[in-house]
Image (cartoon, helix red, strand yellow):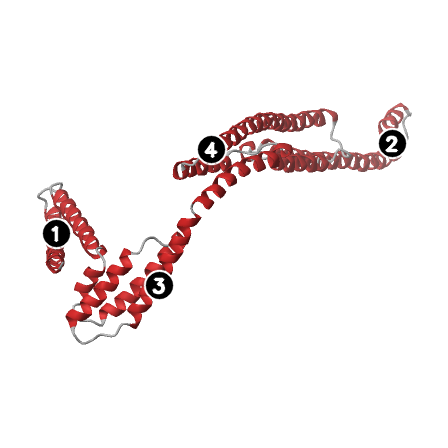
């Protein structure tokens, strides 16, 4: 409309000289106001379009930066698909950009989404293939367990079935419609074997329970023991109780550690009240000598290591200080070794 007015202005004839300047300025100023509003409007549209474009580019970049390697399950992929859908809603389809810009950013957005869905489809296919392989392997484990369930080789078969159970746990998921059925089949075969084993060893367990009662009775007898005042008689009495305790067979495995701690606590206290406690501890259990021998071997090995390491250092002043320090450690360890040797000899002598 403004352009048409300017054309009409030019086509209209002249006015008097005294009115010409004023009327032109009036027309020009009005035109300037319109042009500024026109320019401001389109600059505002351009700014809004630029802001919208940046938002859409950020959405595209978010999708493009998805780390698909972190998606390991169906749920994780489905959650990410929901996130894609939310980003699609956020893309502001109701507020389009100019046709050229809108077409370009739309292609980028669709390419990012399509890449996601392609990766998702690939995962689903791979997962399905993997589940089929897992299904086949679990069927094989069922067959192996069923072939072993009637075995009477208790220890060997127990180890094999335990290994199969561990492998079962490490196998990935299978379809839900097969999962429970196969698990029941597998566990039924395993349970059958272990139930038969339990029946076979029930007599042994009864004996172990009897052994536990007998050993507890001896411990109570040790707790109640009163010294007669004669060291030799005390030693012989406690030695007899110790030998009687050691002569009893195995106890239930779950009670073994608890019983030993109780036994050790009582014997340490009882033997500690008698002179020659160290000698009595050596009598009550050969483990004392074994412990000393283990310390002996450890010290020998440590000494050998230090002596071997000395050879790696040169003759520098710094190296000399290190060697001297290592030599002092060797001397100290040898002193400890001599003490242990003396204890072992004394123990052997008393035995």
Upstream in sequence: badge 1 or badge 2: 2
Cα distance in 3D space between marks 4 and 1: 57 Å
Mark 2–mark 4 CB contact (< 8 Å): no
Q: Which residue is mark 4?
A: 148
Pointer 1: residues within 10 angstroms few (<14), some, or many (20+)? many
- Which of labels 2 and 4 is toward the front? 4
- Residue 17 - label: 2
Cα distance in 3D space between marks 3 and 2: 135 Å
Could you tell whether 168 is left or right of 231 in the image? right
Upstream in sequence: badge 3 or badge 1: 3
Could you tell whether 161 is left or right of 299 in the image? right
- Which of labels 1 and 2 is toward the front? 1
Pointer 3: residues within 10 angstroms few (<14), some, or many (20+)? some
Could you tell whether 312 is left or right of 29 in the image? left
Upstream in sequence: badge 4 or badge 3: 4
- Which of labels 4 and 1 is toward the front? 4
- Residue 216 - label: 3
Cα distance in 3D space between marks 4 and 3: 39 Å
Q: Quadrant of the N terminus?
A: top right
The spot of residue 21 in percent (x, y) is 84, 34
Q: Under tag 4, what secondary structure?
A: helix
Q: Residue at x 85, y 30 (%)?
A: 2
Q: Under tag 1, what secondary structure?
A: helix
State which quadrant residue 33 falls in.
Answer: top right
In terms of depth relative to the viewer, which is nearer, 36 or 76?
76
The spot of residue 335 in percent (x, y) is 11, 57
Residue 62 in sight? no
Mark 3–mark 1 CB contact (< 8 Å): no
Q: Is residue 126 above or below residue 196?
A: above
- Residue 330 - label: 1
């Amino acid at each position: 409309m403004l352009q048409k007015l300017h054309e009409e202005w030019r086509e209209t004839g002249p006015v008097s000289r005294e009115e010409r300047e004023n009327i032109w300025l009036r027309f020009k100023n009005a035109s300037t106001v319109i042009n500024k509003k026109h320019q401001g409007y389109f600059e505002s549209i351009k700014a809004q379009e630029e802001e919208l474009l940046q938002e859409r580019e950020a959405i595209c970049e978010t999708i493009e930066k998805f780390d698909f390697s972190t998606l390991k399950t169906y749920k994780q992929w489905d959650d990410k698909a929901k996130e894609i859908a939310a980003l699609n809603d956020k893309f502001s389809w109701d507020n389009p950009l100019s046709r050229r810009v809108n077409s370009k950013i739309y292609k980028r957005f669709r390419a990012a989404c399509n890449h996601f869905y392609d990766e998702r489809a690939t995962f689903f296919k791979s997962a399905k293939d993997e589940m089929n392989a897992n299904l086949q392997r679990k069927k094989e484990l069922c067959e192996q367990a069923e072939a072993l369930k009637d075995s009477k080789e208790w220890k060997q078969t127990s180890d094999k079935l335990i290994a199969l159970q561990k492998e079962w746990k490490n196998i990935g998921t299978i379809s839900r419609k097969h999962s429970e059925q196969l698990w029941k089949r597998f566990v039924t075969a395993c349970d059958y074997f272990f139930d038969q084993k339990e029946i076979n060893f029930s007599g042994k367990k009864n004996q172990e329970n009897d052994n536990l009662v007998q050993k507890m009775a001896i411990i109570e007898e040790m707790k109640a023991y009163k010294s007669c005042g004669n060291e030799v008689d005390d030693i012989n009495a406690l030695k007899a109780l110790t030998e009687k305790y050691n002569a009893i067979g195995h106890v239930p495995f779950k009670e073994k550690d608890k019983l030993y701690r109780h036994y050790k606590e009582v014997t340490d206290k009882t033997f500690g009240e008698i002179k020659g406690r160290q000698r009595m501890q050596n009598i009550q259990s050969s483990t004392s000598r074994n412990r000393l021998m283990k310390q002996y071997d450890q010290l020998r090995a440590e000494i050998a290591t230090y002596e071997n390491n000395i050879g790696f250092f040169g003759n520098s002043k710094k190296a000399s200080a290190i060697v001297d320090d290592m030599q002092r450690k060797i001397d100290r360890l040898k002193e400890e070794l001599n003490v242990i040797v003396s204890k072992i000899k004394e123990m052997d002598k008393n035995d």
